[in-house]
Image: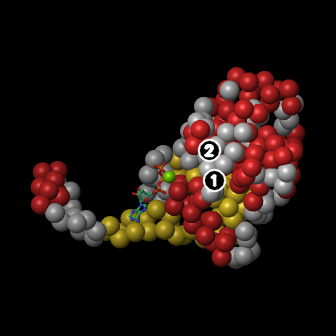
Amino acid sequence: MSESTYKVDIRFQTRVERSKRVLEIAEAFGIGLDEKEFVVFDGLDLEVRQGDVVYITGQSGAGKSLLLRDLERQMGERGMTTANIDKVQLEDRPLIDQIGKDTNDGIRIMQLAGINDAYIWVRKPHELSDGQRYRFRLAKLIETGAQVWCADEFMAVLDRTAARVIAYTTQKVARRVGATVMVATTHTDLVEDLCPNLVVEKRFREKVRVESIADAAEQAAAKTMTRDEIYELMLKVM
Ligand SMILES: Nc1ncnc2c1ncn2[C@@H]1O[C@H](COP(=O)(O)OP(=O)(O)OP(=O)(O)O)[C@@H](O)[C@H]1O
Ligand SMILES: [Mg+2]
């Protein structure tokens, strides 16, 4: 196995607790309660190279979060530094006081994550909307300098225009610094802006579609949004 291949094998023994009501449901709806094996990933081989952008999608309950967590764990075990947007700790202080080496650096990182408003820079996390707080988490994720950035429910709380702009800037920043990005989301509208190298669409049972895009990096490089275009889009969502 090459150092960039990962094997994902996730299965559960389903054991249902036989409470009185569970037994009533089993009888009424004719469902069996025997222990069964539930296979989510049946030894799936994935190739993820450092610097790749991985887009995990599929319906609710399909196995996106399990896959993301498993890849993150395997990468960690291989000695890579990983950072997860859900684990970013926020402090109850103005944003500008908890990011960057100094004020300018803090502003620079926040702008990368789509926080362009001075009024927000001086607020505390609990005073922000979910979408604003998510963008700040992303800024903190960028600041970690980790080799692998993971985000489950990527941009789920953002309106779709903001999500697309931030997806675009996230991959730009990641590709500039060579970070691997792995996101899981049921939305499929961010593919164009993330320019993923790998799309994993998880379906039900152990079914999965894997698409590898050979020229993703070139596509991403060719895709440019001017600063004006980005600001114009950001203005629409503020
Ligand atoms: N510990 C567990 N034991 C048994 N089944 C589990 C366990 N954890 C997850 N599952 C099952 O695995 C499947 C995939 O779960 P997962 O959380 O990865 O879904 P998801 O694609 O992230 O869904 P969502 O979009 O709702 O977050 C689900 O059907 C879930 O019920
Ligand atoms: Mg999930």
> What count of labels does the image hold?
2
Is residue 120 in view?
yes
Q: Is residue 193 above or below residue 23?
A: above
Taking 163 as reference, is 49 above or below it? below
The CA span between labels 1 and 2 is: 7 Å
Give the colouring mode of the picture.
secondary structure
Task: Identify whether 94 is placed above or below 232.
Answer: below
What residue is shown at x 78% (from left), y 24% (from top)?
Answer: 232
Q: Secondary structure at mark 2?
A: helix
Q: Residue at x 21, y 56 (%)?
A: 31
Q: Toward which corner of the image does residue 238 lie, by quadrant?
A: top right
For badge 1, the amino acid type reads: Glu
- Locate residue 233 relative to residue 65 in the image: left or right: right
The earlier-in-sequence mark between 1 and 2 is: 1
Please give the name of the residue rendered at 63% of the width and 53% of the height, measured from the top-left corner: 90
Q: Which mark is residue 91?
A: 1
Q: Position of residue 237 (x, y in %)?
A: 67, 26
Q: Which residue is mark 2?
A: 125
Quadrant holding the N terminus: bottom right
Residue type beneath disc 2: Pro
Looking at the rendered structure, the secondary structure element under dot 1 is loop
Instruction: State left or right for residue 134 relative to residue 230.
Output: left
Which mark identifies residue 133? none
> Is residue 169 visible from the viewing direction of this image?
no
> Which residue is found at the position 70% from the left and 57% from the top?
149
Mark 1 CB within 8 Å of ligand 2: no
CB atoms of marks 1 and 2 within 8 Å: yes
Quarter of the figure with residue 22:
bottom left
